[in-house]
């Protein structure tokens, strides 16, 4: 920015600069106020009966009805969207990455059996563009509706000089609650338990640095180009919102004996499932039980990415896993089918053969991959 032109102070006969302003430094408070007004209708759609007041206060208020829980345990999770945002910015489509943001947070909460109650977002921008902020919050609100939680405010921070005008990043923190005696986790898992996989909607929100490197830089595929295997453009495939499993998992836990869940994000299927398994057991997962979506095969082929690298980077078509009692498998599959969640028996939990055995491993090959 050019330096302010000097003016002459005749009384003192000296030269002084024009007064600096926050707006001149790149922070537009008026635009921020306009953004808040534009996002209010979307935020209002993502509520719960426990929410007190509306958007605009210094803190969001949520009246926890303790009578509903005998011994409530609060669960908290914080996450972001990652470099999927680069695709949204390149396509100038900003109303879906908010869904991804909510998914990354609430589906971590539900792993322990917690019901997501509320979420607060943080949006960092180079410059406040009110319509864009409204689009981002529209997606976040839609995600909260899908998850059944309230959007309890947030923060939009303008960072001129640190971020370019069109750049932004997203993060959020969610709070959930679960009864102390209903907390799911490794201590509930037993040899003989069955692992059920739930299909992902695509890449979800992990591995985009590798996906963009392969598809956009190595293969030089245009985001606007139609891809026959997808039946749509590459950009549309890459921006497919993350499936939100929170309500489905809570319904499953209410109807069947679930030991634990595992949210399949960065690190892949085996590594994330291993996080919720106790020592002394191994989950053997059958690659032949499902076929990953075409986007995974395309990345592997165009980038010559080996299977091990693919499986530790991407979800490979499995977005959430439930470990259930062997007697509850049919019921669990019926619940998920009724909720339109593609699900199947992925593997089983057995006693580990030795202390060095992996807690979860994939075996066999994927059909047509």
Image (cartoon, grey):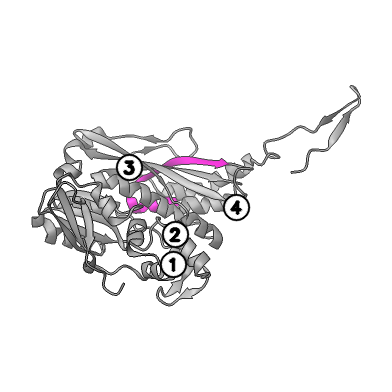
Q: Is residue 9 magenta?
A: no
Residue 347 shows in this picture: yes
Nearest to the eye among marks 3 and 2: give it: 2
Q: CA distance from mark 4 to mark 3?
A: 32 Å
Residue to which mark 1 is pinned: 303
In terms of secondary structure, where does tag 3 sit? strand
Nearest to the eye among marks 1 and 3: give it: 1
In the picture as drawn, the residue positioned furthest to the bottom comes out as 228
Residue to which mark 2 is pinned: 210
Magenta stretch, residue numbers = 140-158
Mark 1 and mark 2 residues within 8 Å of each other at the beta carbon: yes
Q: Residue at x 24, y 52 (%)?
A: 249
**Left or right for 358, reference 243:** left
Q: Residue at x 50, y 67 (%)?
A: 218
In the picture as drawn, the residue positioned furthest to the top comes out as 12
Which mark identifies residue 117?
3
Residue to which mark 4 is pinned: 166
């Amino acid at each position: 920015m050019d330096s302010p032109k000097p003016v002459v102070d005749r009384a003192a006969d000296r030269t002084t600069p024009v007064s600096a302003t926050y707006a001149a430094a790149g922070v537009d408070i008026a635009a921020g106020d306009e953004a808040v007004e534009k996002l209010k209708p979307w935020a209002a759609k993502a509520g719960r009966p426990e929410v007190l007041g509306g958007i605009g206060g210094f803190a969001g208020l949520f009246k926890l009805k303790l009578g509903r829980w005998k011994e409530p345990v609060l669960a908290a999770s914080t996450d972001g969207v990652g470099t999927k945002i680069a695709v949204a910015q390149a396509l100038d489509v900003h109303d879906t990455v908010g869904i991804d943001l909510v998914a990354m947070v609430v589906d971590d909460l539900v792993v322990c059996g917690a019901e997501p109650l509320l979420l607060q977002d943080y949006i960092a921008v180079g410059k406040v563009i009110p319509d864009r902020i409204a689009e981002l919050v529209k997606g976040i609100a839609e995600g909260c509706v899908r998850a059944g939680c309230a959007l309890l405010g947030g923060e939009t921070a303008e960072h001129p000089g640190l971020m370019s005008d069109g750049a932004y990043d997203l993060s959020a923190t969610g709070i959930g609650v679960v009864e102390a005696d209903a907390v799911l986790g490794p201590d509930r898992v037993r040899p003989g338990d069955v692992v059920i996989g739930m299909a992902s909607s695509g890449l979800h929100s992990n591995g985009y640095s590798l996906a963009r490197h392969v598809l956009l830089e190595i293969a030089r595929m245009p985001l606007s180009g139609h891809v026959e295997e997808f039946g749509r453009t590459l950009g549309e495939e890459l921006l497919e919102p993350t499936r939100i499993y929170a309500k489905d998992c809570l319904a499953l836990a209410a109807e069947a004996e679930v030991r634990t869940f595992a949210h399949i994000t960065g690190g892949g299927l085996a590594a994330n499932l291993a996080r919720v398994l106790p020592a002394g057991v191994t989950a053997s997962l059958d690659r032949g039980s499902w076929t990953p979506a075409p986007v995974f095969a395309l990345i592997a082929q165009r980038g010559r990415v080996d299977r091990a690298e693919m499986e530790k980077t991407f979800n490979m078509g499995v977005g959430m896993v439930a470990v259930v009692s062997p007697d509850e498998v049919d019921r669990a599959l019926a619940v998920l089918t009724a909720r339109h969640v593609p699900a199947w028996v992925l593997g089983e939990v057995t006693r580990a053969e030795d202390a060095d055995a992996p807690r979860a491993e994939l075996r066999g090959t994927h059909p047509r991959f």
